[in-house]
């Protein structure tokens, strides 16, 4: 018999719908039942592509004996952290406080039934005691006994936990009058170099995460400081090694979430939409900066993978691909050498074996995961082949392996459509589409944006998630902030007046329902959101950019474009509120540094008016070089539904460019060469 998760939209919750555990989703029914029966809540948080979530599910949640214990002793609640990042944020922080170490998924937290305050937290627990971990069934008994015997200490701990959660959140002393100087920008540059792993790139040993926000900071810093070749070298080396590594799918495109080794060779095989949206933008910027062909191919490869495998027929982007297939992590991606040899012609195999290390020892559990060992010029010289011949053999070999792989059992795909993650992907597609001159990427981004507007925008408010046509859950700060940012990037690829109007409506909701009017900055949840034990307001980046940072950055850009002082003031209040954190650890706040950088040097806004075919020629010319402090909007001369600050920038019979920097606008420019000279 299925449990109560069977009707949920989350694929992760549906994976547990036939467990013998009497699971509830997080809702008022479950919380009321726990209080009525005075049973502690066992809260389990995970996501569909999480390998260790699957392991714990198989070992414990599918076990009749363990499930019987859970049902007897607890009210059991399952949460998809991707649908409910508000809950995940609170209880990950609680885990850090209780366990005195970082958390992760699966997250296992035990809560008081009276107020949902946690009193014990952990992550994965095995079905039998091993590796210093207690068995899950023994843990269940001990927690139940502790709850019955130590009710007073649990009750006393509650207020201390709430106070501790508030203390690790951003200070609420109130937006100050700090000078907001550029020292955090300089500090972040130093901190990134201090943490840089020079051998193979990246900012740690193992495991290694892509850290797209770090790479963006280095590229932006180099653009404003052309003499800083070290900043470019750190970004370049990291992007090259990631692109040649096994963290990137060499056949199908797209990045896995992280590498388990320092060489970027063997990934944790899940593919997340948010990583790929952010990395696509970074690779497109790196292509603009260096002209290195590898970077162009990877940005395009991400886009092709997303369009082929991650875009729904209705237009929205799906969330993730699982790490596992047929019960094994990475099974879909790895190869047997003998099988590869049977699939390829002799010359193809000779080339691909050398390129991907098939002529050496296996690198993943007795098999080979593809990782670039040798570049084509080097291979051509070693094998006596011309470079065109190498490219031809590589392309034909790739095609055969890709088609053979496509016949395997595919990893599971999480088909929920998340507003925030779609916004990150729309941004990546828009940037890559216009910088690489690939209109199909822009088409894809427009389809996704249309889906969000038609499906997840209801009565002037955003919803956070949709699956199978059912959209629900109030959206979070990240949803609004990322979407405003994405719209501004897409408008630079292809103008839509209705999209600009929507960006303004989204910004107004942010100010009305999310802003901390006393202290500055934005809460993660709206003022009319479900009441939880804590309303968080944080500034640091994590796996995704900080919502406060992107809100400050996007609001300022929108404020300059529309001449809207409310947006500019809210952006500055956010920087003031975040100033202590920015000073203490600037490299952890790269998203806020975007706003700080443009607070000091407002973006150049270029409005082009003319006929479409002429506009495109000018726009492409301006896209040739990476200019992160510039926005270019090409608006057809026939359009007249523009807001007042743009309506006065009129077409005068020949193509014309209007340039504004902050509150200063320059005289119109009628020649492309004159415009380029003015911008430089």
Image (cartoon, rainbow, N blue to C red):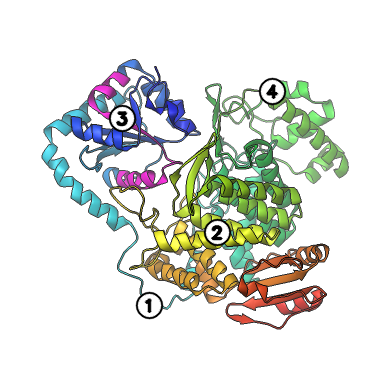
**Pointer 4 residue:** 407
Tell me if residue 398 is in the magenta stretch: no
Which secondary structure, mark 2?
helix
**Pointer 2 residue:** 484
**Label 4 vs label 3: CA separation?**
39 Å
Q: What residue do we see at 61% from left, 82% from top? A: 664
Residue nearest the observer in this picture, 303 or 330: 303
Of circles 4 and 3, which is in front?
Answer: 3
Taking the image as shown, residue 637 lies to the left or right of residue 553, namely: right
**Pointer 3 residue:** 76
Residue 99 drawn above or below residue 502: above
Q: Position of residue 334 (x, y in %)?
A: 63, 28
Which secondary structure, mark 4?
loop
**Label 2 vs label 1: CA separation?**
27 Å
Pick whichever of labels 2 and 1 is earlier in the sequence.
1
Q: Is residue 680 visible?
A: no
Pick whichever of labels 3 and 2 is earlier in the sequence.
3
Q: Which disc, if any, is residue 177? A: 1
Which secondary structure, mark 3?
strand
Q: Position of residue 34 (x, y in %)?
A: 23, 33
Residue 393 drawn above or below residue 617: above
**Label 4 vs label 1: CA separation?**
61 Å
Of circles 2 and 1, which is in front?
Answer: 2
Q: Position of residue 674 (x, y in %)?
A: 79, 79
Pick whichever of labels 4 and 1 is earlier in the sequence.
1
Residue nearest the observer in this picture, 146 or 640: 640
First to last magenta residue range = 67-96
Instruction: Kindly indicate whether the residue at mark 2 contacts the one at mark 3 (C-beta within 8 angstroms).
Output: no
């Amino acid at each position: 018999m299925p449990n109560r998760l069977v009707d949920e939209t989350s694929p992760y919750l549906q994976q547990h719908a036939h467990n013998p555990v009497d699971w509830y989703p997080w809702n008022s029914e479950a919380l009321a039942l726990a209080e009525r029966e005075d049973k502690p809540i066992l809260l389990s948080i995970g996501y569909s592509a999480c390998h260790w979530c699957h392991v714990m599910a198989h070992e414990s949640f599918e076990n009749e004996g363990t499930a019987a214990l859970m049902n007897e002793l607890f009210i059991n609640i399952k949460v998809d952290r991707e649908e409910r990042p508000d809950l995940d944020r609170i209880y990950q922080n609680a885990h850090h406080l209780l366990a005195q170490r970082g958390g992760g998924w699966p997250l296992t937290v035990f809560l008081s039934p009276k107020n949902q305050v946690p009193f014990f937290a952990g992550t994965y627990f095995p079905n039998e005691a091993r590796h210093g971990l207690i068995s899950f069934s023994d843990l269940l008994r001990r927690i139940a006994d502790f709850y019955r015997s130590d009710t007073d200490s649990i009750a006393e701990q509650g207020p201390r936990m709430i106070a501790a959660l508030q203390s690790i959140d951003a200070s609420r002393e109130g937006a100050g009058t700090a000078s907001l100087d550029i020292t955090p920008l300089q500090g972040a540059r130093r901190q990134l170099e201090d943490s840089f792993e020079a051998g193979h790139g990246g900012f740690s040993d193992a495991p290694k995460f892509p850290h797209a926000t770090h790479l963006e900071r280095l590229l932006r810093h180099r653009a404003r400081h052309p003499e800083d070749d070290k900043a470019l070298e750190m970004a370049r080396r990291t992007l090259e090694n990631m692109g040649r590594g096994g963290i990137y799918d060499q056949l199908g495109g797209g990045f896995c979430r992280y590498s388990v080794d320092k060489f970027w060779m063997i990934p944790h095989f899940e593919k997340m939409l948010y990583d790929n949206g952010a990395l696509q933008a970074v690779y497109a910027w790196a292509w603009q900066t260096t002209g290195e062909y590898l970077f162009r191919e990877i940005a395009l490869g991400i886009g092709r993978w997303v369009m082929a495998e991650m875009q729904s027929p209705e237009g929205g982007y799906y969330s993730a691909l699982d790490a596992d297939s047929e019960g094994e992590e990475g099974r879909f991606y790895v190869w047997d050498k003998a099988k590869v040899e049977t699939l390829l012609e002799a010359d193809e195999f000779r080339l691909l074996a050398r390129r991907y290390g098939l002529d050496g020892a296996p690198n993943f559990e007795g098999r080979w995961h593809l990782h670039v060992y040798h570049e084509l010029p080097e291979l051509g010289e070693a094998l006596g082949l011309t470079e065109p011949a190498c490219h031809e053999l590589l392309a034909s070999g790739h095609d055969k392996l890709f088609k053979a792989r496509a016949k395997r059992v595919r990893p599971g795909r999480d088909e929920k459509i998340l507003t925030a993650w779609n916004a990150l992907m729309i941004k990546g597609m828009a940037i890559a589409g216009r910088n690489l001159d690939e209109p199909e990427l822009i088409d894809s981004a427009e389809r996704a944006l249309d889906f969000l507007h038609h499906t997840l925008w209801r009565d002037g408010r955003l919803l956070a998630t949709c699956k199978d046509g059912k959209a629900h859950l109030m959206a979070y700060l990240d949803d609004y902030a990322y979407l405003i940012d994405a719209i501004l990037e897409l408008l630079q690829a292809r103008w839509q007046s209705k999209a600009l109007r929507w960006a303004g409506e989204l910004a107004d909701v942010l100010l009305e329902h999310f802003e901390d009017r006393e202290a500055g900055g934005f809460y993660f949840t709206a003022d009319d959101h479900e009441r939880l034990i804590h309303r968080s307001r944080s500034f640091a980046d994590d796996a995704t950019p900080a919502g406060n940072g992107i809100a400050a950055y996007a609001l300022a850009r929108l404020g300059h474009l529309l001449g809207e002082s409310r947006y500019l003031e809210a952006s500055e209040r956010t920087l003031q509120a975040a100033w202590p954190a920015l000073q203490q650890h600037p490299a952890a706040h790269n998203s806020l540094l975007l706003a700080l950088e443009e607070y000091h040097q407002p973006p150049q806004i270029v409005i082009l008016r003319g006929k479409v075919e002429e506009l495109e020629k000018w726009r492409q010319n301006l896209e040739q070089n990476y200019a992160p402090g510039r926005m270019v909007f090409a608006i057809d001369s026939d359009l007249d539904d523009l807001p007042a600050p743009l309506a006065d920038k009129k077409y005068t019979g020949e193509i014309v460019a209007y340039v504004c920097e902050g509150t200063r606008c320059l005289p119109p420019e009628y020649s492309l060469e004159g415009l380029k000279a003015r911008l430089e």
